[in-house]
Amino acid sequence: MTTPAPTQGREQMPIDKLIIWIGSISSIVVHTIIFIFFFALSLFGIMSWQLMLLVLTTTVSLEAIYLAIFIQLTVNRNARELQEVSEDIDEISEDIDEIGEDIDEMSEEDERDSVTRARQEEALDVLTNDVRRVLSDLEALKQSR
């Protein structure tokens, strides 16, 4: 047997407990004992068959009405909870999309950074070659003096 999700408001707690009890084995046992009791009343002549059947069918009809109400309460609560879960899933999906966009932007930035680094390395190589050439020219000038 599972326990229901927390409900909104304290007044729903007894209803939740009743719904859980109605769906339990102990409820089946209690109902069976009540039916046996009513049939025993008629079998031992304490109550007429007509009166017993009238009371029993009226009780069962009222119980069916209440069970239908309890079922609808449970369906409504589950629908609300499902809607909340659906909204949470939508929010998570949006977050995932945003993270994906951020990753794409970061990848583009990394790509741009690597292009910039490559250009800087080329410029550094050119500058290094220019400095070497200037140094060799200076060396040549020193030796010619």
Image (tube, rainbow, N blue to C red):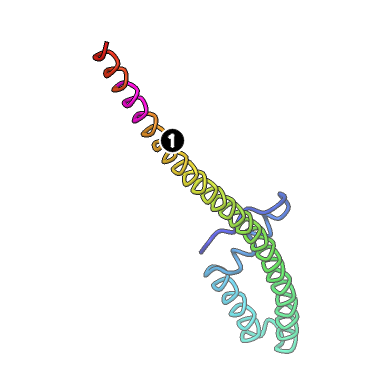
Main SS class of the magenta portion in the image: helix
Residue 91 sits in quarter: bottom right
Q: Residue furthest left?
A: 143
How crowded is the residue under tag 1: few (<14 C-alpha within 10 Å), some, or many (20+)? Answer: few
Residue 144 sits in quarter: top left
- Residue 126 screen position, x and y as percent: 38, 33
Instruction: Judge by depth and name the residue closer to the eye, 51 or 69.
Output: 69
Could you tell me the amino acid type at mark 1? Gln
Q: Which residues are magenta?
A: 128-135
Label 1: which residue? 120
Q: Residue at x 36, y 34 (%)?
A: 125
- Residue 135 screen position, x and y as percent: 31, 21
> Would you place residue 80 above or below residue 51 in this image?
above
Q: Residue at x 74, y 89 (%)?
A: 50
Residue 7: within the magenta? Answer: no
Q: Secondary structure at mark 1?
A: helix
Marks counted in the figure total 1
Residue 134: within the magenta? Answer: yes
- Relative side of 105 to 86, left or right: left
Q: Residue at x 49, y 48 (%)?
A: 107
Residue 56 sits in quarter: bottom right
- Residue 5 screen position, x and y as percent: 60, 56
Instruction: Judge by depth and name the residue closer to the eye, 125 or 114.
Output: 125
Q: Residue furthest front?
A: 144
Q: Residue at x 44, y 43 (%)?
A: 114
Instruction: Judge by depth and name the residue closer to the eye, 77 or 57.
Output: 77
Q: Residue furthest bottom?
A: 50
Which part of the image, by quadrant, shows the C terminus? top left
